[in-house]
Image: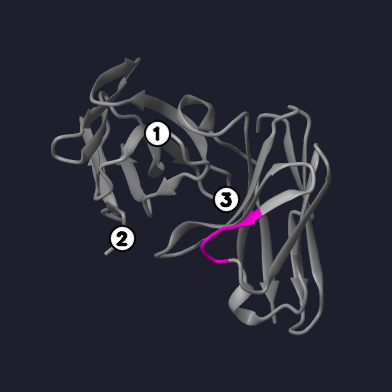
Amino acid sequence: QKEVEQDPGPLSVPEGAIVSLNCTYSNSAFQYFMWYRQYSRKGPELLMYTYSSGNKEDGRFTAQVDKSSKYISLFIRDSQPSDSATYLCAMITGTASKLTFGTGTRLQVTL
Amino acid sequence: DAGITQSPRHKVTETGTPVTLRCHQTENHRYMYWYRQDPGHGLRLIHYSYGVKDTDKGEVSDGYSVSRSKTEDFLLTLESATSSQTSVYFCAISGGAGGPYNEQFFGPGTRLTVL
């Protein structure tokens, strides 16, 4: 079983929909959680970064961490075709120097 | 791409030939990483460096070696390329280790095909 599980999708939604992307993990030592967005044939870019449990909002994006359930989410409000990309979750303990990535969820926002 | 370049961006080579990929950064970040990305596997760490001449293995290091003689350059070498090493290779950098300093920033990638 992988340390981080992420549904690969693809997930197809209409423009304007609320999107929920999720990851589950098994290592309770993870403390820092990130979401990366990767457009086709590009490198991943950091989208959101959170520490421990709670919510963090940035424009149309909200990252949520529930450490008790070992579950993290990324919500996208008012989704746009430009949000079409692969979204990867990543996490790390407080002392490690290596991120653990999910496999990524491919999102398609249609007009 | 946060001051990270990779070269070459595309390469086609034959089985058994040596291949070297270069990652160059202008951010003066201490940590540098090499990943490969394959369908169904996501990003997998090959090797990483935590300083000049300081490197360590990742989860898929077999068949790869690395070197870092300067802060800004991190080289990935396939000593004898195999078809299983056909992949997209990404370099990443971060300012530190542990906690909030491990936000990693990625380069544009190198698409390698081994025939």
According to the picture, the residue beneath numbered tag 2 turns out to be A2
Determine contact: label 2, label 3, CB under 8 Å.
no
Element at label 2: loop
Quarter of the N terminus of chain B within the rendering: top right
For residue A50, above or below residue B56: above
Please report, as a chain letter, where disc 3 is located: A
Q: CA distance from mark 1 to mark 2?
A: 17 Å
For residue A18, above or below residue B16: above
Dot label at residue B89: none
Disc 3 crowd rating (10 Å Cα; few below 14, some 14-19, many 20+) is: few
Q: Residue A31: x percent and y percent?
A: 33, 32
User: Residue at the left extreme?
Assistant: A69
According to the picture, the residue beneath numbered tag 3 turns out to be A41
Element at label 3: loop
Question: Magenta span covers which residues?
Answer: B56-60
Disc 1 crowd rating (10 Å Cα; few below 14, some 14-19, many 20+) is: many
According to the picture, the residue beneath numbered tag 1 turns out to be A34
The mark that comes first in sequence, 2 or 3, is: 2
Q: CA distance from mark 1 to mark 3?
A: 21 Å
The mark that comes first in sequence, 1 or 3, is: 1
Which of labels 1 and 3 is toward the front?
A: 1
For residue B90, above or below residue A51: below
Element at label 1: strand
Q: Could you say which quadrant of the image residue B57 lies in?
A: bottom right
Q: In the image, B81: left or right of A8?
A: right
The mark that comes first in sequence, 1 or 2, is: 2
